[in-house]
Amino acid sequence: MRHVFVLAALGALASSSGVVAQEISIARGELISITSGCHDCHTAGYNESGGKIDPEAALRGVPLGWQGPWGTTYAVNLRDEIKEMDEEAFVKYAKTFIAKPPMPFYNMHAMPESDLRSLYRYIKSLGAPGDPMPEALPPGETPRTPYIVMAPPIMPQ
């Protein structure tokens, strides 16, 4: 009898966690933005604060460049990036866009649609978009902003 109770409890827990995963809400979008690392690159001061989200800076991008063989890229202002998109357009965009390093665009492609919808609602809830970040630069062009070089060292022979 005890085993039946334990199995029933585990089943209830599994089904309730499945419901949470399907929930579409701003709160879930905020959680997704944290656990998926969006703020790590797209929110100024996030890493330096130990993971505290400044609502004014949240997902407005960072003008620190990431330079490698692909050129120099920037963590875009996500509020600005999606300001003209409705939820359907965002889901389609998130499932198909391709970006240069270090953006792991393939992680967005793998997200369930409910997570993308929640993320969209969270980004939209943050308010005015603010200014766009610098445009990506081609290889060989020197950035006018601070940047980090992401290239393997040349190994001695």
Image: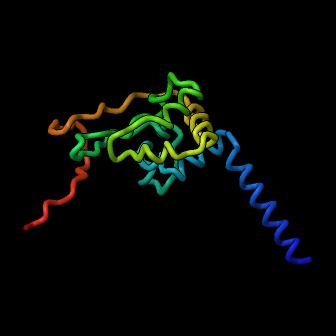
Most distant residue in the left direction: 157
Residue at image coords 45%, 28%: 80
Quadrant housing the N terminus: bottom right
The quadrant in which residue 143 appears is top left
Q: Quadrant of the C terminus?
A: bottom left
Residues 123 and 54: in front is 123
82, above or below 40, in the image: above
- Please count the marks in the image: 0
Q: Position of residue 47 (x, y in %)?
A: 43, 53
Q: Is residue 68 left or right of residue 62?
A: left
The residue sitting at 74% across, 49% down in the picture is 19
Q: Is residue 110 left or right of residue 24?
A: left
Residue furthest to the bottom in view is: 2
Image location (x, y in percent) of residue 130: 44, 28
Q: Give the residue at x 24% y 45%.
A: 67
Judging depth in this view, the residue of 5 and 27 nearest the camera is 5
Q: Position of residue 4 (x, y in %)?
A: 87, 72
Q: Residue 12 versus residue 60: which sits nearer the camera? A: 12
* Residue drawn where x is 39% and y is 36% of the image: 76
Q: Residue furthest right?
A: 1
